[in-house]
Image (cartoon, coloured by chain):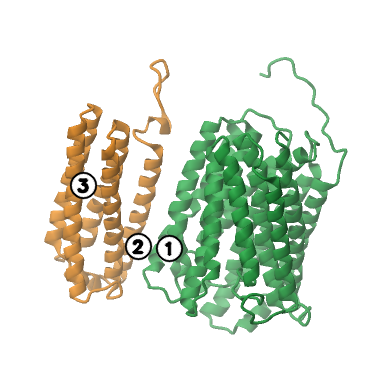
Amino acid sequence: MKYQTQKIAYAYFLVAMILFAVQVSMGLILGWIYVSPNFLSEILPFNVGRMLHTNSLIVWLLLGFFGAAYYLVPEEAEREIHSPKLAYLQLLILIVGTAGVVVTYLFNLFDGNFLLGNEGREFIEQPRWVKVGIVVAALIFLYNVTMTVLAGKKTAITNILLLGLWLLSLLFLFAFYNPANLALDKQYWWFIVHLWVEATWELVMASILAFLMLKLTGVDREVIEKWLYVIVATALFSGILGTGHHYYWIGMPGYWQWIGSIFSTLEVVPFFGMMAFAFVMVWKGRRDHPNKAALLWALGCATLAFFGAGVWGFLHTLHGVNYYTHGTQITAAHGHLAFFGAYVALNLAIITYAFPILKGRDPYNQVLNMASFWLMAGGMVFMTFTLTFAGTVQTHLQRVNGEFYMDVQDQLWVFYVMRFGSGVAVVLGALLFIYAVLAPRREVIEPGPVITTAAE
Amino acid sequence: MSRTPTEPPARGIEALPGDLMMWVLIVSELLVFGAGLLAFMGVRLTDPAGFAEAQSHLDRTGAGLNTMILVTSGWLAARAVAAAESADTARTRALLAGAAALGVAFLWIKWLDYAAKGAAGITFETHPFFTFYYLLTGFHAVHVVAGIVILGLVAIRPRAPTVEVGAMFWHMVDLVWVLLFPIIYLLGAGA
């Protein structure tokens, strides 16, 4: 650890991992509700559980991004974070807000209250006071990190990271605009949801991936920056108008079907670019970095993001296909692998890279961590396949044959059982990961034999 | 990227003239317009008679004139690059201004075309043909506007590399129109 304030990242990553555990545990409960629909129906209705599953995901991913920024900005800008106090205050606000959301929803407090009641809009359900808190926290963060970068060295990695974080914060302001017209509501809602995960978050992802590649492979910064710019350009080019693929059936004009189909198809390009980037850098790189687990997560992230976000996204993005598959388990399959591959694996990669350094245990052989990768990635891929098969059957029975929704759900039962099994693997993997980065102390690698003659 | 004479000649993407990012943009644009035209031709297969009827409402003369205007404008932009390479600032600016002025002429004729369509009550929703017509030519017109702005920007301090990048964008706009014009306006006409 070159800079003392990088330590801020430790607190962020820690809270992120706690919420990660909450998120996957909630996922497991929801998976069981699919198998046995009356499970906990009185105490934890499905909609509340689902809100906790998705919102804790988003919050912990954002905490991970903030942590990653606090970790890599000092190294890139070559100076300490402007104000560590503000950074911890920001974290505190986010924790209080998150707790507020959970309590408000679990007990349905202040129902209908303008300031304190829930807003009931998927993903941006937070009560208004929490939304204000999120904006304040974001402003603190942007001020803190921007001041650090302005005073220090500006690199392509920090520029792209800041661009992504600034834009995603500004887009969140649409959470305060809630038109009564449901079509308009959805139109603006996607400005947050889509333009986060399919535009601005991709900038964050590309820059963190670039930082990891720089550190892990030792390839020249100039080469990495060229890749980074191309990836970011294709992400914004395709992602912004790609929003159109959410406008097919919500009452927007019909031309969105073509704009959405064409641009969102091109969204595969930046994800392919990131995968190609990661592998080419590793092949080109001469550095044999001891943190093999971080490299595994970084490569796994780029690969699974390409398949989850890219391929599984394309699978149902053309409006002629989406007409049949919209809102089936195909969407769930895509959502799970895309979020896991692109953003969960990315956060776990930077955590895996940073933790040994933050804890002063470098170099470090993280065998348990690598096992957790295979457990989680394996579970997630299996889940994606079962949900894809479930979605295919569902599309045919429900949308082609016209059977009733619940009758079709009965016939999907076997897939939901298998999905639950894969969920168990993911939860075990997540717990193993958290244990692996926090607990073991003596897992230091033995130095290999020193080779004095040139290899032929 | 300046290279000293001792370095070997550039290969692969390093050998591309102009800026790499502009090539990324050009390829992306061609993919978008190419996909749009393919979709247009695909949908036309489902209703050849309806598409032919809709196409008969288009102003082929205006579009043909616009083709000549845009190609001439592209030629002026290419001359501007040559002038910038011989460091003739006044001539570069004059040629860029000429290219941009023809771009404005293109937009004016296009605007008359849209106005006539609007007056005839033809909208996005009239027929799938017109959905594509407005989408593709509209997207293209937006790129003409962007191109005029870019030509103006590179004319402020016209160095050869920046003028080249601006001209590359302008040629892409030109190329896209040369693809749109025959496929939307001419193909199948008179059949």
Name the chain under label 3.
B
Residue on which disc 2 sits: B39
Q: CA distance from mark 2 to mark 3?
A: 31 Å
Q: Which mark is residue A261?
A: 1
**Which chain is assigned orange?**
B
Q: Are marks 2 and 3 in contact (CB under 8 Å)?
A: no
Q: Looking at this view, is A188 or A386 the one in front? A: A188
The answer to whether any part of residue B117 appears in the image is yes
Q: Are marks 2 and 1 in contact (CB under 8 Å)?
A: yes
In what quadrant of the picture does the N terminus of chain B appear? top left
Under tag 1, what secondary structure? helix
Q: In the figure, is residue A359 to the left or right of A351?
A: right
Q: Provide residue A315's location: percent of width, then percent of height.
A: 52, 62
Q: Looking at this view, is B140 or A446 the one in front? A: B140
Is disc 2 in the same subunit as disc 3?
Answer: yes
Is disc 2 in the same subunit as disc 1?
Answer: no
Residue on which disc 3 sits: B100
Name the chain under label 2.
B
